[in-house]
Amino acid sequence: MTATNTATTKLPHPAHRMPLIGDLLALDARRPAQRFAEHAHRLGPVYSVKVFDRDLIVVAGPGEYAEVCDEKRFGKHVGFGFAAARENFGDALPTAYTTEPNWSKAHNILAPAFSLAAMKDYHETILDTARELVDHWDASVGQGLVDVHTDTSNLTLEIIARIGFGYRFRSFGGGEPDPYAAAVARGFAFVGRAGYNIPVHWIDGIVRHRAIKQHNEDVAYVRGVVDDVITARRLDPDPPTDDLLALMLTTADPESGEHLDDENIRNQVIAFLNAGHETTSGTLSFALHLLATHPEVAKQAREEIYRLWPPGTDPDPAFGDIHKLKYLRRVIDETLRLWPIAPGFFREPVQDTTIGGHPVATGQAMVALTFAVHRDPVWGPNPDAFDPDRFLPERARTRPPGIYKPFGTGVRGCIGRQLALHESVLTLALILHRYDLAPEPGYELQVVEEFTLKPAGLRLGLRRR
């Protein structure tokens, strides 16, 4: 967040703002986006929050949200969480300032690897890895409930490691789980609460001594794993030539003619491994919960799947088959509407302007609160209900444009969007073809915010069809 901007003092803000700590007592570091959405119901579509010396404008109305996505007036702001994450990711794509040279260089080099056409090259690896999850779950049938988010995290970590860097964590090998995923989860929790840290460093260091020590150990461990991956690739006499690491090691930026330096390559690998698996695993986990608790939706999705691969067969999806699963894709879209894994994204004005009629200064930190906009009444009656048919073309045309942004916006939107969608639809197709999903009796969804959203303690029962 930026230093206090006097213009924000005229905006609505939570009641009982206090000296020094601002609105700290009105917020919730464990579920910040959900609490922001609650405040929006009372304060309106644009309001301010202040935590210690940090000022933030929250944009939670559909019209204002679309306005702040205008690339001519607003750009990416490296918000307090991403600023803290720079300790892990440095100037990698998610955390770089747009003005940093390495952002444009890396984006130019890597964008072709995340195009829709590129997914064809990754399809077989994604399919093989998803089958490992299914085999793992087969062994659990009749043995109790499966730990959904742990297993989807293992799946998506394996996928990005294999297709991106030729590395295997062997998450479904039956041994001890790789500690990398645990270090990543702790890291996301640490940086996700960065906006609530005490800005006096020596006090913050005392209060959070144990957490800081653990975080430093996790950062060192993650960097060590990635350095080993890069070293092994450089020593390989016959290295792969078509994955993300090969691109970064051998390809020059077509605009500048420059290559990425080794430190930036390490930052990019860490960012892809961490953000690239945590986001998609959350999508899969929420989708599985919603399918288990809405059997009529699961039935309709399964009927679509069975038209491609009849019951009792062993599906062998071709790349083109995934795009035929239109209803299942709507399930994913509706999942991301209700539970956008990135519940908001930071923006800032590129020059003094207004938002919703309120003046905002150049560089002012703003959060476009996707979580609130995705549940606004503009989506129709009962916007909190799970209804994949909201994304039928004829219904989508009735809504204002620019209000569905689960992957961020503009040139700084998620580069891995096509990968996330392809692996999510493919994995759900295999799971629904094979299993009936049963919710854990008495389970009530609790959503944890650790930089991204994820369901806490989600377990499901499986029955082979």
Image: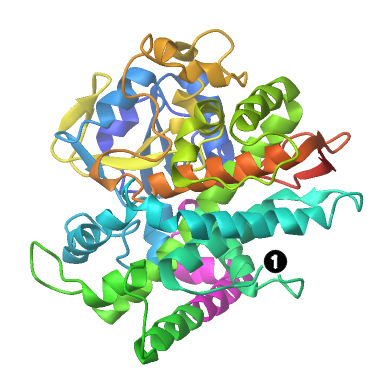
Residue 388 relative to residue 314: left or right:
left
Q: Is residue 11 above or below residue 128?
A: above
Q: Is residue 28 covered in magenta?
A: no
- Whether 195 is among the magenta residues is yes
Location of residue 350 (image quadrant): top left
Residue at 53%, 17% in the rendered image: 389
Residue 273 in view here: yes
In the rendered view, how is the structure colored? rainbow
Residue 343 visible in rendering: no
Q: Looking at the image, which is closer to me, 147 or 362?
A: 147
Looking at the image, is 30 positioned above or below residue 369?
below
For the stretch drawn in magenta, the main secondary structure is: helix
Quadrant the C terminus occupies = top right
Q: Position of residue 416 (x, y in %)?
A: 38, 50
- Left or right of residue 28, residue 291 in this image: right
Above or below residue 142? Residue 61 is above
Above-or-below relation of 181 to 224? above
Residue located 39% across and 89% down the image: 236
Q: Quick one: label 1, few (<14), some, or many (20+) residues within 10 Å? A: many
Picture coordinates of residue 337 (x, y %)?
A: 50, 29
Question: Going 56% across and 73% down the picture, which residue do you hit?
Answer: 168
The image position of residue 181, as x and y in percent, is 60, 66
**Residue at point 51% right, 49% down?**
279
Q: Which residue is mark 1?
A: 172
Q: Amino acid at mark 1?
A: Phe
Q: Quick one: 8 or 438, which is closer to the camera?
A: 438
Per the rendered image, the range of residues in magenta is 193-222
Residue 294 screen position, x and y as percent:
72, 24
Badge 1 marks a residue whose secondary structure is loop
